Image: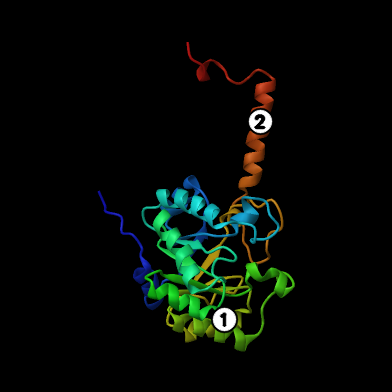
């Protein structure tokens, strides 16, 4: 029996030097995480996007720390190989370094997550540094930051090259092991990737990043609302489920299910 090699933070970072593209997907429950892990993703992000794709909110802001821990616990129990990263929800890392350590510490203590992700670059550098000094690996997130949707005036492509580069470099200097680049021009993302020693993970940032991340619901066609233009749907699970349920309802109403093969004597 082949022993499964677990991906940890150093192995994740080393993928950049090995010029191996990194595959990251979100998951929010046990069965989905198990499928993604068995399919070979390098990391699973328990994203605060669950507020929108699971809970039905319009933004990521309502999800709580307790809810993130609840979902991360399910994901962690399913994973044997992938690195598990958990989003710090709003506003847990805006309340000071000690509070951020307390909240991130809860995630590591109460789940099997290995690292946390927080939105921000230069302005969050002290928090990133504090978390890392406490032994908590941090993935940073620059560009479009969904938790800042109100301040940014909506979900817009971020084009300030100097600020984006400053944020990414500051996050790296503070100790972040990776940086997510969301919704920025591909030329800028490629430049940032070339200047960083740590991996960049793109979402709507072109092919020049060291890896890519998508929301699993978008990837498999389970999204119930708007699908971003940077998403390629690799399946149409939503239609398959609706068709299966419709057929089942028809069989139940026509007394075709259950038949003798699905019954006990």
Which colour style is shown? rainbow
Furthest-top residue in this view: 265
**Which residue is at the front of the view, 198 or 18?**
198
Pinpoint residue 136: horizontal percent, then vertical percent.
40, 69
Q: Which residue is mark 1?
A: 123
Kind of element beneath mark 1:
helix
**Which residue is at the front of the view, 131 or 145?**
131
Q: Quadrant of residue 151?
A: bottom right
Q: Quadrant of residue 207?
A: bottom right
* CB contact under 8 Å: marks 2 and 1: no
Q: Which residue is mark 2?
A: 247
Pinpoint residue 260: horizontal percent, then vertical percent.
53, 15
- The residue positioned 30% from the left and 55% from the top of the image is 4
Q: Is residue 224 left or right of residue 170?
A: right
Furthest-right residue in this view: 153
Determine the CA span between mark 2 and mark 1.
53 Å
Sooner in the amino-acid sequence: mark 2 or mark 1: 1
Above or below — where is 190 with respect to 40?
A: below
State which mark lies toward you, 2 or 1: 1
Furthest-left residue in this view: 1
Q: Dot 1: within a 10 Å radius of its alpha carbon, few (fewer than 14), some, or many (20 or more) residues? A: few
Kind of element beneath mark 2:
helix
Pinpoint residue 164: horizontal percent, then vertical percent.
59, 83
Answer whether residue 19 is visible to the viewer in this image: no
Q: Is residue 94 left or right of residue 160?
A: left
Above or below — where is 128 with respect to 32?
A: below
- The residue positioned 61% from the left and 89% from the top of the image is 162
**Which residue is at the front of the view, 149 or 224?**
149
């Amino acid at each position: 029996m082949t022993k499964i090699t677990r991906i940890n933070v150093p192995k994740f970072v080393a993928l950049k030097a090995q010029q191996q593209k990194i595959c990251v997907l979100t998951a929010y429950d046990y069965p989905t995480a198990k499928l993604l892990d068995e399919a070979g993703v390098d990391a699973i992000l328990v994203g605060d996007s669950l507020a929108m794709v699971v809970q039905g909110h319009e933004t990521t802001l309502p999800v709580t720390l307790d809810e993130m821990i609840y979902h991360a616990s399910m994901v962690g129990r399913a994973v044997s190989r992938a690195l598990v990263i958990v989003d710090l929800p709003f506003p847990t890392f805006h309340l000071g370094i000690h509070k951020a350590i307390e909240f991130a510490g809860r995630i590591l203590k109460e789940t099997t997550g290995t690292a946390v992700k927080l939105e921000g670059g230069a302005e969050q550098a002290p928090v990133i540094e504090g978390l890392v000094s406490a032994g908590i690996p941090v993935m940073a997130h620059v560009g479009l930051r969904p938790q800042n949707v109100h301040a940014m005036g909506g979900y817009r492509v971020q084009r300030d090259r100097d600020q984006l580069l400053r944020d990414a470099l500051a996050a790296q200097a503070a100790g972040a092991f990776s940086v997510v680049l969301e919704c920025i021009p591909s030329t800028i993302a490629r430049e940032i990737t070339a200047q960083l020693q740590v991996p960049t993970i793109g979402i709507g940032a072109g092919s020049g990043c060291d890896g890519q991340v998508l929301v699993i619901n978008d990837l498999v066609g389970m999204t119930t609302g708007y699908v971003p233009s940077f998403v390629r749907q690799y399946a149409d699970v939503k239609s398959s489920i609706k068709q299966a349920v419709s057929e089942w309802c028809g069989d139940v109403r026509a007394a075709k299910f259950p038949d003798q093969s699905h019954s006990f004597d």
